[in-house]
């Protein structure tokens, strides 16, 4: 293949496939990035790179996926996202690894099976509380957006006519100016085998639009934080003192608020990290194996007045509609960062030469046909050669080893999230392929010569790499002034693999590492939270060694003060209320 032909292929835009429910923001971001939309009549059936849909794929879709393609769902994730399944998995983990490690999930009963157990617990609590009421929440297992939810204190009010969970109602939520809120945290499982989890450093805080009041359990706008519920409430558009208009903040605004109240937001963020990992671990060994897919989860986390995070539920296909400015700033960037995380730049390239000793593709992708192989240039660019030890050397934080540092990196990103946002409109004019080409490291000689060639492109096309560089450089040199020790922290930087692609034997799945390789520590605002050290990396190598991973997590959790005792996060709710 000549250089010109090669260049032509490289410049061909990537193709995304959607269905009628695919969120607009996903389509818009991909178009802005220079992707083309798949059209059945025009393109070949295998001629797309990303298929993004709201509902799950069929197993046949997973088995037919090609090395250059990605699906936005992993099979088997309803284990986490159906409320009753989640409760069952967490209960099993509590049984095996101890209730204290999994104490972040409110006591839950699955109806109708657990009805008798629930009544026993209800009666026990009633007796213990005397005249004080106890509070429960009843939620249909398969519904979302607050539909069918009921809060009750008296057993006679409990009714259900479908699979339902009854859960302890967290009646002491963190209130901001007397409004209840919860956090929507975005988590991308880039791969279940090996388990690779990224936590998004920006997110949303969803507010109830009426003041919290336990004397009126029927007022959904005071007790439920779903925006679909509150959007229709009478106070949605009002400028609510301490919260503002609408019902959402960005997560960075929330953390800034906490810092201003002298709350240890880092500790809170670490607890959220733990919660996310432990939740995903509850299903990780049982999800079916599938390659080239990823899952974006929306974790709903309630913070109580002791700053303890509680997992309420995990959403598959979290809502991506853009209803307010917070949505726009968070969700658009989120999609951009997912695309970056998926590392499409390499998957689009065609392989030009067969290297000596190159095996016919039979990696975890399954076998490749001759034409498939032709279309792939493998790279492990997503994985860094940095060692945890190196990272550690680079940071002089003393307490909890790598975990703390990763958490801190996250916080730093939060603090700077707003200033780091770049206008993605700029990307509209840039072909993803050129972008990838220019961003490319050392792939092979063909690519290097192409890079040279692209240097002569017009300014607006070459603008992207400068922007990329700027966004890397814009990582602030130090933490915001939260505590002194944090200002000494230096994030460990992405170290792209210097290994030329031609040395690879066969198609490398985008997340599977070769020996000594590991996933990048952060991509955009996604920060790697699992694996988090050498031991957990090793524990993912030949299947997931859950016991080992839990052991490592337990060590970290043990180092933290518990929310109840000697909690550094503690700042009285009273104090927050008064602000
Ligand atoms: P849905 O899938 O319908 O959104 P969730 O479990 O997320 O169901 O609950 C909806 C809202 O109800 C949450 O966002 C939160 O405000 C409130 N909520 C749910 N469970 C609890 C709980 N155990 N304690 C306190 N509030 C809860």
Image (cartoon, grey):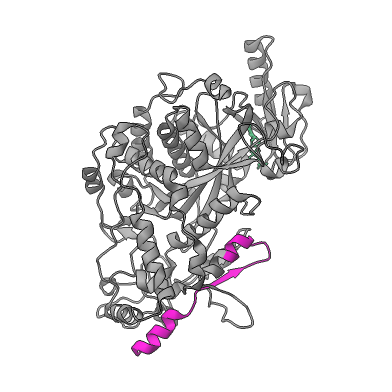
Task: Write the residue at 52% across / 67% down.
Answer: 63
Residue 237 in view of the camera: yes
For residue 200, say whether it is visible.
no
Q: Nearer the viewer, residue 547 or 132?
A: 132
Query: Would you say residue 19 sits in the magenta stretch?
Result: yes
Instruction: Give the percent coordinates (x, y) of residue 86.
Output: 57, 41
Residue at 50% of width from left, 28% of height from top? 308
Q: Is residue 203 above or below residue 168?
A: below
- Magenta region, residue range: 1-28
**Residue 347 shown in magenta:** no
Question: Could you tell me residue 357's position as x and y percent?
Answer: 25, 78
Looking at the picture, tell me which residue is in the foreground, 119 or 234.
Answer: 234
Quadrant for the N terminus, please.
Answer: bottom left
Q: Quadrant of ligand 1?
A: top right
Which residue is nearer to you in this view: 464 or 550? 464
Task: From the top left corner, tell me how far across and down residue 471 is, in percent.
Answer: 38, 57
Place of residue 541 in the rendered image (x, y in percent of width and height, measured from the top left) = 33, 53
- Single out the residue that lies furthest toward the top: 130
């Amino acid at each position: 293949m000549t250089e010109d032909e090669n260049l032509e292929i490289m410049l061909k835009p990537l193709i995304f496939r959607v269905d009628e429910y695919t969120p607009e923001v996903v389509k818009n971001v991909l178009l802005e990035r220079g992707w083309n939309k798949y059209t059945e009549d025009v393109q070949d059936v295998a001629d797309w790179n990303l298929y993004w849909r709201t509902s799950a794929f069929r197993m046949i879709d997973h088995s037919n996926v090609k090395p250059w393609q990605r699906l936005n769902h992993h099979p088997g994730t309803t284990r986490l996202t159906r409320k009753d399944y989640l409760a069952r998995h967490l209960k099993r983990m509590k049984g095996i690894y101890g209730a204290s490690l999994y104490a972040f999930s409110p006591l839950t009963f699955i109806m109708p099976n657990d009805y008798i157990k629930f009544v026993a617990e209800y009666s026990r609590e009633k007796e213990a509380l005397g005249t004080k009421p106890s509070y429960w929440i009843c939620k249909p297992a398969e519904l979302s957006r607050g539909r069918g939810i009921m809060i009750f204190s008296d057993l006679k009010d409990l009714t259900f006519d479908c699979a339902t969970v009854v859960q302890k109602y967290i009646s002491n939520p963190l209130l901001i100016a007397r409004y209840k809120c919860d956090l929507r945290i975005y988590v991308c499982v880039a791969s279940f085998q090996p388990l690779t989890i990224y936590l998004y450093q920006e997110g949303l805080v969803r507010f109830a639009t009426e003041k919290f009041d336990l004397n009126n359990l029927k007022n959904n706008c005071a007790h439920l934080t779903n925006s679909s519920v509150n959007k229709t409430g009478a106070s949605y558009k009002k400028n609510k003192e301490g919260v503002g208009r609408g019902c959402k903040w960005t997560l960075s605004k929330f953390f800034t608020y906490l810092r201003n109240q002298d709350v240890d937001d880092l500790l809170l963020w670490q607890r959220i990290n733990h919660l996310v990992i432990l939740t995903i671990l509850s299903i990780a060994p049982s999800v079916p194996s599938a390659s080239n897919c990823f899952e974006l989860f929306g974790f709903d986390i309630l913070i109580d007045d002791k700053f303890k995070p509680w997992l309420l539920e995990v959403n598959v296909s979290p809502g991506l509609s853009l209803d307010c400015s917070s949505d726009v700033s968070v969700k658009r960037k989120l999609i951009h960062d997912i695309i970056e995380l998926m590392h499409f730049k390499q998957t689009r390239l065609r392989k030009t030469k067969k290297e000596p000793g190159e095996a016919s593709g039979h990696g975890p992708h399954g076998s490749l046909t001759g034409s498939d192989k032709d279309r792939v240039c493998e790279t492990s660019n997503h994985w860094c050669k940095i060692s945890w030890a190196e990272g550690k050397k680079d940071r002089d934080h003393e307490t909890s080893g790598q975990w703390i540092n990763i958490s801190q990196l996250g916080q730093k990103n939060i603090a700077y999230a707003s200033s780091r946002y770049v206008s993605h409109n700029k990307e509209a004019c840039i072909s993803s392929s050129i972008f990838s080409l220019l961003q490319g490291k050392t792939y092979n000689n063909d690519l290097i010569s192409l890079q040279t060639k692209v240097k002569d492109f017009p300014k607006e096309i070459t603008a992207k790499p400068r922007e990329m560089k700027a966004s890397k450089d814009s990582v602030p040199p130090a933490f915001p002034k939260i505590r002194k020790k944090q200002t000494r922290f230096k994030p460990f930087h992405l170290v792209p693999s210097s290994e030329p692609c031609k040395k690879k034997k066969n198609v490398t799945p985008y997340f599977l590492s070769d020996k000594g390789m590991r996933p990048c520590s952060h991509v955009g605002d996604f920060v790697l939270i699992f694996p988090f050290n050498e031991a957990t990396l090793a524990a993912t190598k030949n299947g997931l060694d859950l016991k080992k991973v839990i052991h490592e997590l337990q060590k970290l959790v043990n180092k933290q003060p518990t929310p109840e005792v000697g909690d550094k996060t503690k700042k009285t709710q009273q104090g927050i209320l008064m602000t």
